[in-house]
Image (tube, rainbow, N blue to C red):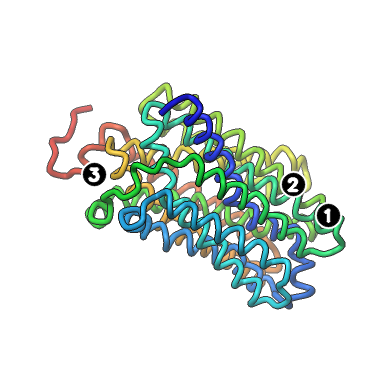
Amino acid sequence: MGGKARALLLAAVVLIGLNLRPFMTGVGPLAANIGAQTGLGLQGMALLTLVPMLLMGVFAFAGPSLQARIGARQAIIAALAVLGLASFLRLFVSTGWEMVATAVLLGLGAAIVQAVFPGVIKQQFPLHVSVVMGLYSAMLMGGGALGAQLAPLIAKAAGDWHAGFGWMAVPAVLALFLAAWSLPRGTARQRGGHTAKAFLKRPRTWLLMACFGLVNSGYSTVVAWLAPYYQSFGWSPQSSGSLLAVVSVGQAVAALSLPVLAGRSADRRPWLWLTLAMQAAGFAALALRPEVAPILWTALLGAGLGGCFSLSMILALDHLHDPVEAGALSALMQGGGFLIAAIAPWVVAVLHDATGSFVAGWVLHLACVAVVTVLYWRASPASYVAAMNPTAPTPRT
């Protein structure tokens, strides 16, 4: 791959990543406006995050088979077209179920991209996987910041909350054209379906799913309920959206920088534990002292969530040398993980209805962080070969 082609592909990594989160992070700051017109309550509003995350999980399992049948390039282009169409349709929704229906389309588009894109990165940047995956993860989080910040601002400027979502069609269409121009054509169809089935028999696959899911359940809850939480203290939609943007910026910085730092060592666990400690501090602050230095604690929480997401993706790719197999494992980890994460906003909404507060939800995520901290003890580099190939001799440590 020449220098120009590589630069175009990196630009595609940036623009594609930016499109995969704004439609979710824009919901929280505009929740009151959406609910007032559509009649959605807290549990109904949770569906706008739950449904996309659920689809990200379901379609991640189908990612290897989809790539084998039609190829990564075609799948990504089609998915970006769906994202653009669904964002445009949000200009015209008037009921809760229409809003949920667009969430289905948006979740479908994001799910397909997330299922196949890590394998493309592993294949096209074999010597720089950590750096490029860090860039991709940072753009995911950066897109979240854009959604949280721009959705309420554009809605206010237009005098209509629909505009806070409709603008998202523009970057999706731009990403579609850039993907069509830059994604390689020669590696369209690859094996992977049978590999994925074999990986489901490995306990390590399920461990990675559990860790990824429990961490991202914290992210999905923050996306859904951080802004309404602070609006309950009297914050405006714009101010609470800015706070969610702070979380996303913290995620982006950590997702980009921590993989570079962690790339100096084959063992990702010390860095993963650092990100989990950041999450614990952030969730504890939200539960105990939410109005004391909220920018500091939400930035720290975002850094913990973003860094852990990026390092978790790299950890899955580290387990296998073959790009297709590594991509299949990453897709499965995301599949099971997003299924777990999808439930969290609804569970927290139920806890809120039962207790009258979001505090129980933040405490729940503190417990999740503790569980993941323990589970990651098993993910040492010396265990990779035996974990994914039980017939291979176990390396001595």
Q: Earlier in the sequence, mark 3 or mark 1?
A: 1
Q: Residues within 10 Å of mark 2 (few under 14, many from 20)?
A: many
- Res. 139 image quadrant: top right
- Say which element carries label 3: helix
Residue under label 2, please give it: 243
Quick check: can you spot residue 332?
Answer: no
Q: Is residue 65 above or below residue 328?
A: below
Say which amino acid is labelled 2: Leu
Q: Earlier in the sequence, mark 1 or mark 2?
A: 1
- Say which element carries label 2: helix
Q: Earlier in the sequence, mark 3 or mark 2?
A: 2
Answer left or right for 386 relative to 283: left
Q: Please identify the quadrant where the N terminus is shown.
A: top left
Q: Is residue 80 above or below residue 178?
A: below
Going 12% across and 43% down the picture, which residue do you hit? Answer: 391
Say which amino acid is labelled 3: Met
Going 74% across and 60% down the picture, which residue do you hit? Answer: 228
Residue under label 3, please give it: 388
Residue 251 spot, x, y in % from top left: 60, 40
- Res. 87 image quadrant: bottom right
Give the label on residue 235, or none: 1
- Res. 262 image quadrant: top left
C-alpha distance separating marks 1 and 2: 10 Å
C-alpha distance separating marks 3 and 2: 41 Å
Front-most of residues 302 and 248: 248
